[in-house]
Image (tube, rainbow, N blue to C red):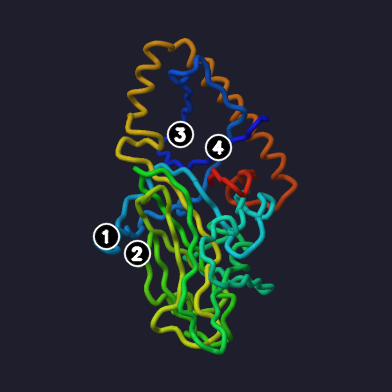
Amino acid sequence: MKTIEIKEYILWVDSDKLEISFKPSKKSKFGFINAIEVISAPKDLISDIAQVIDSNGVVKIDGISKNAYETMFRVNVGGVKVTPFNDSLWRTWVTDDGFLESNQESKKVHFSGRIKYRMGGASREVAPDNVYNSARVISASNSGVAKYELTWGFPIVDGYKYLVRFHFCDIASSVLLGSLYFNVRVNGRMAIEDLDLSTITNSLASPYYADFVVSGENGVITVSIGPSNSSSSSGVDALLNGIEVFKMSNSMDSLDGMVSVRSIMKECRGRTGGFLVPLVAAVGLLVAASMVLRKRLMGARDSVAWSPLPVDVSEVSLKSSY
């Protein structure tokens, strides 16, 4: 049975040339790839500032935008699968059912109104309407406050740091602002306490996202939402619209081990320089062909500020990126 594997990366490029090279591993004498697409993404897609969560608490850091990222999971919480044709950057968002660990009761909600994007806040390029107009919600019965959390688990490789992005949009509260407070945890540690979306957005149905850097523990990253001590009996005690998990490059600027990419390519050029030249040339032709095809496809669609990426993979194991 043939298998398809799609790798999706976010790279900071500060030159007018992007070189992509391939080197066969020790177990093989050749390497291959079927297609490559190079897409220009908005500069603020990955913010330079995030919050690190560890045993010491939550601390802000900066300078992370120039890391390399591999998209591990992109999940539409409480909603349907979002295909590339419903995303301005042609991303695929899978449903959250396969990642939900809690046995606690929750419900899915959907919103048919207009999502109110704010200047300087989350945009459709951060996540599309189809992510923000659905959510999974905790709501207590008998007009009380729920006493449980919802938890999702994502299998990862230990030894790396990961950027975890939460997407929120209050589409479930009543018309009153300030009625929803809840807590957000990552790996069991408090990430946001008493989150009040209406104070941040000053509106209902207005999206907001938050980024956290964490280390994988025992091969899994868990994220949870639950009511806070400030929760009121408004009918909604917590909600979440989407989750993304990105692997971050390590101290060797690598996403696969502790060996420097520069040392690998230096060794490779020394032994097989004649092989790399035609391979890089072939990659260039593939990239050029994909760009021409994409321009033709874009002619039939509404124009956007950058070119989209078609990515559609299974819901069991998503490996993709912007």
Looking at the image, which residue sits at the far left? 56
Q: Tell me the kind of residue under disc 4.
A: Val
Mark closer to the chain start, 4 or 2: 4
Q: Tell me the kind of residue under disc 1.
A: Ser
Q: Is residue 266 above or below residue 34?
A: above
Report the residue marked by disc 3. Answer: 16
Q: Tell me the kind of residue under disc 3.
A: Asp
Q: Is residue 179 above or below residue 240?
A: below
Q: Where is residue 85 in the image (x, y as percent from the top left)?
A: 69, 51
Q: Nearer the viewer, mark 3 or mark 1?
A: 1
Report the residue marked by disc 4. Answer: 38
Mark closer to the chain start, 1 or 2: 1
For disc 4, the neighbor class at 10 Å (few under 14, some 14 to 19, many from 20) is some
Q: Tell me the kind of residue under disc 2.
A: Arg
For disc 3, the neighbor class at 10 Å (few under 14, some 14 to 19, many from 20) is few
Looking at the image, which residue sits at the far right? 300
Q: Position of residue 209 (x, y in %)?
A: 47, 64
Q: Circles 3 and 1: CB distance less than 8 Å?
A: no
- The front one of 4 and 198 is 4
Q: Circles 3 and 2: CB distance less than 8 Å?
A: no
Q: Circles 1 and 2: CB distance less than 8 Å?
A: yes
Q: Where is residue 98 in the image (x, y as percent from the top left)?
A: 58, 55
Report the residue marked by disc 2. Answer: 189
Distance in Å between CA atoms under marks 4 and 3: 13 Å
Report the residue marked by disc 1. Answer: 55
Q: Is residue 50 above or below residue 251?
A: below
Q: What element carries label 3?
A: loop
